[in-house]
Image: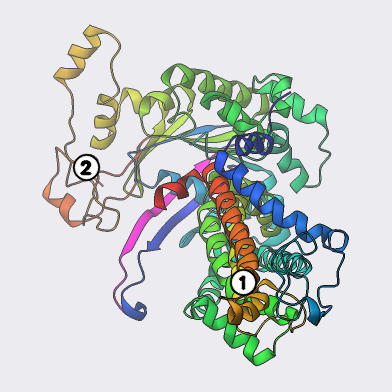
Amino acid sequence: MNSLLDAQGLVKHYQIGGGGLFGLGERPLLKAVDGVSLSIDAGETLGLVGESGCGKSTLGRLLIRLLPPTAGRVIFEGQDLTSLHGASLKQARRAMGVVFQDPFGALDPRMTVEAIVREPLLIHGERADRGRTAAMLEQVGLPASAAARYPHEFSGGQRQRIGIARALILQPRFLVCDEPVSALDVSVQAGIVNLLQDLQARLGVAMLFIAHDLGVVRHISDRVAVMYLGRVVEQADKRTLYARPMHPYTQALIAAVPALTPVGRAERRAKRIRVGGDIPSAMAIPSGCRFHTRCPVAMPVCRETDPPLVEHAPGQSVACYLYGG
Amino acid sequence: MSDSPARATIRRLLRHRLFVTGLALFLIVLVLAALAPWITTVDPTKLSIRAKFKPPSMDFVFGTDNLGRSLWSRTVWGARLSVEIGVAVVVLNAIFGTLVGAISGYFRWADAPLMRINDALMAFPAILLAIGITAVLGPSTENVILALAVVYIPRTARIVRASVLVLREMEYVQAAVAAGAGHARILRTHVIPNALAPLIVQLSFLFAYAVLTEATLSFLGLGAVPPTPTWGNIMAEGRQYMIEAPWIITIPGVLLMITVMGLNLLGDGLRDVLDPRLRLQA
């Protein structure tokens, strides 16, 4: 266990509503993240994929302690993040960065780009001169003239670059990218993904790359974890996962990635796995395997007991009774 | 060079017709108040019984009252007092309203207790609470300021709290948390500056309410002690001679109207430019 980051049994539950008069009523529980363990090595990119509302953003925030977990631990560089407070937590945050989805909400509209990028340096009492922010802006592909301007003067893709500059200026060892390209035009997405890939190669930062489709993740990830209703249902090397997806949910997600050639399309149509309906509510998670309500190959056992995440092939873990377990 | 949001806002304000009209009206009152010692030649409390009930003329621009005091001097010094009280109440609100609102909105544990106190104060009609407080403390300028601050701070705090509740969840605040910023830094650099727009709108209306409520209190004899001239007590005295000497009550009344109307137009303009969402609700 010498990975950079180790999450063990992470759980995040929310109590919804006031529970009636004087809080005496029963308060429904929203299980956003419901028992996730994963690890990320230094310099590695883990792609995290799942539908909206499956808890992937919550998981990302738990890993960098933007949210306190209900249960479980996050071990980052040998330190239990969940037990840190005050100065030691601040110190740990130095080594972690985050890039958000919404390029419009992620930048303070009243600050210049330079002030935004410089802020992490100021927080940690570091030298925050013009040269340093200018160098960072250049690394993310923004002109030096951007420094004195305000976020509203930039396009979505450029704003995302500003956010990336802010996240990387302290040279973190771990970066959470929470759907960094989902809100961008397709034409701009590739630029941001390539930039992240470049920077990662240059800086050696480990990344959790969150996305809701497998297409984007494929380019950038070393390993991919698929999340469904607060759980990781499959986790594997990128190559393995795309070539031989095991979990029916992963198979359906891969089938949903649009094919580029007519031949590929026909081939895919033949063996397409369809998943109907919507993701169930995180406030009423199905018993047994949480995917059985939508699973095309559900068996009686799936309704009864919850399949554990088991390593079925080297480097490939699946939570599904199709493979024994 | 690029345009800062602040400078762009000022430019848009100056193009807003209502804002400029309101500003002009309010400036009339501000100028009168600021120049009071230089533009009045007669002591506002100087009696001259021989000159009582003089209608507006060349000698007395606004006429004289029942005791022969110059109404020009009295209303101009009254304007000064109104503006002083308005400024004091606005400043107290800006400080304590922001403090209570920001703490309440940002720190969840503080929200319930602070807001219950707030609700209790807001449950009283503004004027009744102000009358109650000045009645207990006794009539004086300081007590009027204190009463008006107590009455209006909960309202200001509510507005600040509402913006802070939204702002604390913004991703740029989350980004600052992730970078290791402490609460003080986040409140100072991200939350409070971004909560200012609705606060400024509120404060411009508050200035009008403060002037109006102060006039009401001193009309009722609970404001600054006579013979100190205030618009309220000039009107209270003039009320008895409304038929014989209508100018006594009319002149401060018109000035009060100009002040309140000016500030309301100014506030509407600020609201349109700073906080367009509010316009849809209004």
Q: Chain of mark 1?
A: B
Q: Residue B23 in the image: x percent, y percent?
A: 65, 48
Height in image: A176 above or below A153? below
Identity of the amino acid at label 2?
Answer: Asp
Q: Closer to us: mark 2 or mark 1?
A: 1
How many numbered discs, if any?
Answer: 2
Q: Is residue A248 left or right of residue A208?
A: left
In the displayed orientation, state which residue is furthest to the bottom: B136
Q: Categorize mark 1 by other alpha carbons within 10 Å: few (<14), some (14-19), many (20+).
A: many
The residue that mark 2 highlights is A278
Q: Is residue B217 visible?
A: no
- Disc 1 secondary structure class: helix
The residue that mark 1 highlights is B249
Residue at image location 48% in from the left, 19% down from the top:
A188
Q: Residue B280 in the image: x percent, y percent?
A: 40, 47
Distance between the alpha carbons at the discs numbered 2 and 1: 71 Å
Height in image: B235 above or below A120? below
Identity of the amino acid at label 1?
Answer: Ile
Q: Is residue B2 left or right of residue B175?
A: right
Q: Could you say which is closer to the camera, residue B242 or residue B25? A: B242
Q: Which residues are magenta?
A: A24-41
Q: Is residue A282 left or right of residue B69?
A: left
Residue at image location 83% in from the left, 58% down from the top:
B35
Quarter-of-image position of residue B6: top right
User: Magenta stretch containing residue A39, yes or no?
Assistant: yes
